[in-house]
Amino acid sequence: MHLEQSQQNEELSDALHDTTIVQQLAPQWRCRVLIVDDDDIIRAYLSAVLKKASYDVQVAASAEEALRILDTSQFQIVVTDWQMPGMDGLELCRKVRLKQVDGYVYVMMLTVRESKQDMLVSMAAGADDYIVKGS
């Protein structure tokens, strides 16, 4: 039994050593989130909360700015306000869905609109999730 225990300890030590090497070689991956909202306070608040949760966060003050950012960078999640001057969140969502990107971009619509009809319109535009501000 002592030999068996010793062998298990050695195997565990080897496994830990291998894991340590892999962790040292592999860069730490962090989920990238793009926050799109014309409200400075909302952008700052969401950015702070997500950064504290270890997300890699970038912000855009408009849908047009978000599209320029998306042309040069990849994000796994886009959180967008619905109502913004110029292009709204629905149109941004549609354009994100038409973009050729590696992987899937999860789009969350953030809005003050509470009706089921609004939620359905958002989903039809390509949003994956619908969050009502303040709820």
Image (cartoon, helix red, strand yellow):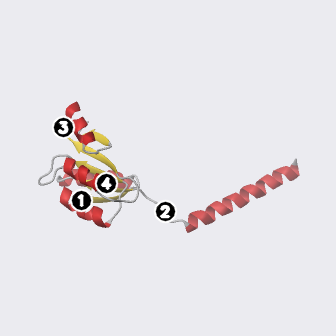
**CA gap, disc 1 to disc 4?**
18 Å
Determine crowd level at label 3: few under 14, some 14-19, many 20+ residues with C-alpha closer than 10 A: some
**CA gap, disc 3 to disc 2?**
37 Å
**CA gap, disc 2 to disc 4?**
20 Å
Q: Earlier in the sequence, mark 1 or mark 4?
A: 4
Q: Amino acid at mark 2?
A: Gln
List x then y, in percent, for residue 120: 24, 36
Q: Earlier in the sequence, mark 3 or mark 2?
A: 2
Give SS at disc 4: helix
Q: Is residue 9 left or right of residue 46?
A: right
**Residue bearing mark 1:** 66
List x then y, in percent, for residue 93: 25, 50
Give SS at disc 2: loop
* Mark number displayed over residue 48: 4
Determine crowd level at label 4: few under 14, some 14-19, many 20+ residues with C-alpha closer than 10 A: some
Between marks 1 and 4 in the image, the one whose residue lies nearer the viewer: 1
Pointer 4 with pointer 3, Cβ within 8 A = no
Which residue corresponds to the image point at 36% horizontal and 56% vertical from the top-left?
51
Between marks 4 and 3 in the image, the one whose residue lies nearer the viewer: 3
**CA gap, disc 3 to disc 1?**
21 Å
List x then y, in percent, for residue 110: 24, 44
* Mark number displayed over residue 113: 3
**Residue bearing mark 2:** 28
* Mark number displayed over residue 121: none
Q: Is residue 113 above or below residue 20?
A: above
Between marks 3 and 2 in the image, the one whose residue lies nearer the viewer: 3
Q: Is residue 108 above or below residue 74?
A: above
Q: Amino acid at mark 1?
A: Ala
Determine crowd level at label 1: few under 14, some 14-19, many 20+ residues with C-alpha closer than 10 A: many
Q: Is residue 69 left or right of residue 14?
A: left
